[in-house]
Amino acid sequence: MAFQDYLLTVEHPDRCSIDKIIKHCTVFTNVCTTLDTISSKICMKFQEPGDEDYDILQKALQNLDYLWKNAGLSYTPKLHSVLVHTMEQMRECQGIGDMLEDDVEHIHQLAAKIEGCTSRMKDKFWQAFVHSKIEAIQNCHEIKSKLVLSKEDAKRNFKKRNMVLDSEQRRSTLKLERNSSRLETLQLLLEKPDLSLPTIKFKTTR
């Protein structure tokens, strides 16, 4: 709600009323939280989703449709595909996280790094040789495990009084907080509160 807090401090004769600011910020905060809930379920991979996940996804999709109408936003082809086809595809494939573009994008980034290391080599044979060697190193599980151990050994050992939650615990804590926020918003929107946004008329100058 940082945007809301900031907007409420603005002093201007044409500023919206406090009620309008709070209502708009609430709607779009709920839109973002609902989209986050949907994306978290869409990212689940083959055979990961359970009955509860499908139920949450279905409710979140209904809430998103409700919020989108209240916000007066246009229904783009991408939004249509999310609202209409996501659940069908999730059930048909038992999870579609494996088919998303994240892994493909990651591979493109790795390929770009390798290309940056070899692109200036004039000899095409050695360019291909070095390219394949780097790729083999990146895909070698033994080398990966050694790199992880090396990074762990290089980390500073903090004294107990200065210790903070390790990365795994932090991720777990943040995930619990996100899930709590998602479910809270989900249940609130199922009650279909009055969130219709009024049309704003802008003054025109001649």
Image (tube, rainbow, N blue to C red):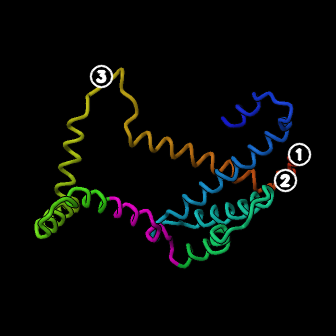
* Sooner in the amino-acid sequence: mark 2 or mark 3: 3
Q: Residue at x 43, y 69 (%)?
A: 98
Q: In which quarter of the image is the C terminus?
A: top right
Confirm or deny contact between disc 1 and disc 3 (CB under 8 A): no
**In the shown orientation, is residue 3 left or right of residue 155?**
right
Of the residues shown, which amino acid type is indicated by label 2?
A: Ser
**In the shown orientation, is residue 8 left or right of residue 13?**
left
**Residue pointed to by mark 3:** 159
Quadrant housing residue 127: bottom left
Q: Which mark is drawn over residue 196?
A: 2
For label 1, the SS is: loop
Q: Which mark is drawn over residue 148?
A: none
Place of residue 95 in the rendered image (x, y in percent of width and height, measured from the top left)? 50, 70
Q: Nearer the viewer, residue 124 or 92?
A: 124
**Residue pointed to by mark 1:** 206
Q: Is the magenta stretch mostly helix, strand or loop?
A: helix
Q: Nearer the viewer, residue 35 or 193?
A: 35
* Sooner in the amino-acid sequence: mark 1 or mark 3: 3
Of the residues shown, which amino acid type is indicated by label 1?
A: Arg
Q: How far apart are marks 1 and 2 (CA)?
A: 31 Å
Q: How crowded is mark 3: few (under 14 residues within 10 Å), some or many (20 or more)?
A: few
* Sooner in the amino-acid sequence: mark 1 or mark 2: 2
Q: How far apart are marks 1 and 3 (CA)?
A: 68 Å
Q: Indicate yes or no whether the magenta region holds residue 90.
A: no
- Asked if residue 172 is positioned above or below residue 128 in the image, the reply reads above
Q: Residue at x 22, y 62 (%)?
A: 139
Q: Residue at x 35, y 63 (%)?
A: 108
Place of residue 81 in the rendered image (x, y in percent of width and height, measured from the top left)? 63, 72
Q: Residue at x 39, y 29 (%)?
A: 164
Q: Nearer the viewer, residue 95 or 67?
A: 67
Of the residues shown, which amino acid type is indicated by label 3?
A: Lys
